[in-house]
Amino acid sequence: MRKRVAWVSVPALLLLFAGFAWAQAVGGRDPFKVDPYRIDMCEEALYLEPDVKEPGRFTLMLSARVVVDVDPLKKIPVGVLVTTGLAPLGDWIPMSSMQVQQEQEGTKAYLASEKVRPGMTASYYTIPLASIDVPPDEHNGSGTPSFASLFSSKQIVSVKLTLRRQGFGAGFPPLAEKAYDLKPLNYALLEAAAEGNVSLMKELLNKGADPDAATVQNWTALMEAAAKRRPRVVALLLREKVGVDVKHKGFPFIVSYLGSVMPGGETALMVACSAGDPETVRLLLDNKASVAAERSDRWTALLAAAYSGKAEIVRMLLAKGAEVGATSETGYSAGALALINGNAEALAALKVKALEEGEDTVRVPWDLSSQDH
């Protein structure tokens, strides 16, 4: 009986091993390790580029940084495939210089696969999507026409990133894949917010742009306006009831296999405090922006304000209940940041609040017992 059991077990083990090997060869997935392959996109933008040879012709461009994270222990060669498309096309013409498959409602462009190495790799892409001819009288004979005049709220740029084994044909499952739907009107709103162009923003909003427009990593138009010190744009967006406490995801990946940490979770209020813009901070606080919100590394609006040195902003945050004794993940308090950067007025405001609450004015990651502050 024992010999018979042993005889049956050997084929079973061989079958199990063969199944594991096949899963590795085809799917590239290690069942004992989570996400050995990851792919994502950041810093993307949609914009119009005039044709230098054909006056009145403009090309819709996508620029983006594609980040790939591959387990260094994986020795197989991998490649990135970027697939893009605009739908519905409307008056737009697909780029003839690319490998294009035109469909009923749009066009898809399949870019050549790019080989990447194990570890974390970031590649920057600039991709022409489609072109359009605009009569001079529709854009005053000079400059670039408005997105609002060229796009509808229904038009979408689809982007698909695929990480696959290099040299393997179709039919094999991807190692990692991610897809996005980008609205040109929303990216135009982000750009208008950065420029402080209120009239263009109103035009885009009337055309159907989303006031909560954001990048794939959740950098919103409100954050963009706060970063560029555009209080009039901030006021406009707040009237549209945008989310004031939306958090930026940060850049992929939050923790890589290489051990690097990229903090995420920044809010528009933190951005405005870093920019040192009291008017924008006041607008956000009046619209109930949270002073207690933390980034993934425990960075807060008060820490940002103390670091930038705007005492007026520090006092506004403290009046709204910001915690004077809070520290970042690395151990710095707001008082320490104000002291290190020589922001005496901000430090004085923090000391007054700290005395009221019995908190340490300064807290840093080393012993300050011998120092008098």
Image (spheres, helix red, strand yellow):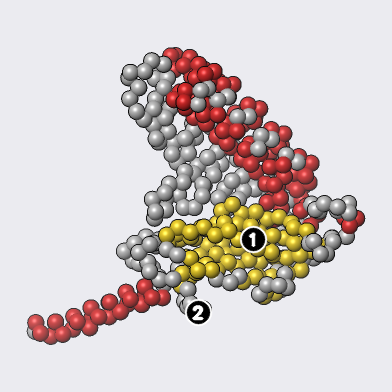
Q: Is the C terminus in the top left, top right, bottom left or bottom right quadrant?
A: top left
The answer for how far apart the CA atoms under marks 1 and 2 are is 25 Å
Which mark is nearer the camera, 1 or 2? 1
The residue located at (39%, 35%) in the rendering is: 330
Question: How busy is the neighbourhood of tag 2: few (under 14 within 10 Å), some, or many (20 plus)?
Answer: few
Decide which of 357, 81 is in the foreground and name it.
81
Amino acid type for the residue under numbered disc 2 = Gly
Q: Secondary structure at mark 1?
A: strand
The residue located at (47%, 43%) in the rendering is: 263
- Specify the quadrant of the image occupied by residue 248: top right
Mark 1 or mark 2: name the one nearer the start of the chain.
1
Report the residue marked by disc 2. Answer: 169
Relative vertical location of residue 206 with respect to residue 309 in this rendering, above or below? below
Residue 266 at least partly seen: yes
Report the residue marked by disc 1. Answer: 126
Question: How busy is the neighbourhood of tag 1: few (under 14 within 10 Å), some, or many (20 plus)?
Answer: few
The residue located at (32%, 19%) in the rendering is: 369
Instruction: Locate residue 2, reporting x and y percent.
Output: 9, 82
Amino acid type for the residue under numbered disc 1 = Thr
Q: From the viewer's perspective, is 143 left or right of 221? A: right
Disc 1 to disc 2: CB gap under 8 Å: no
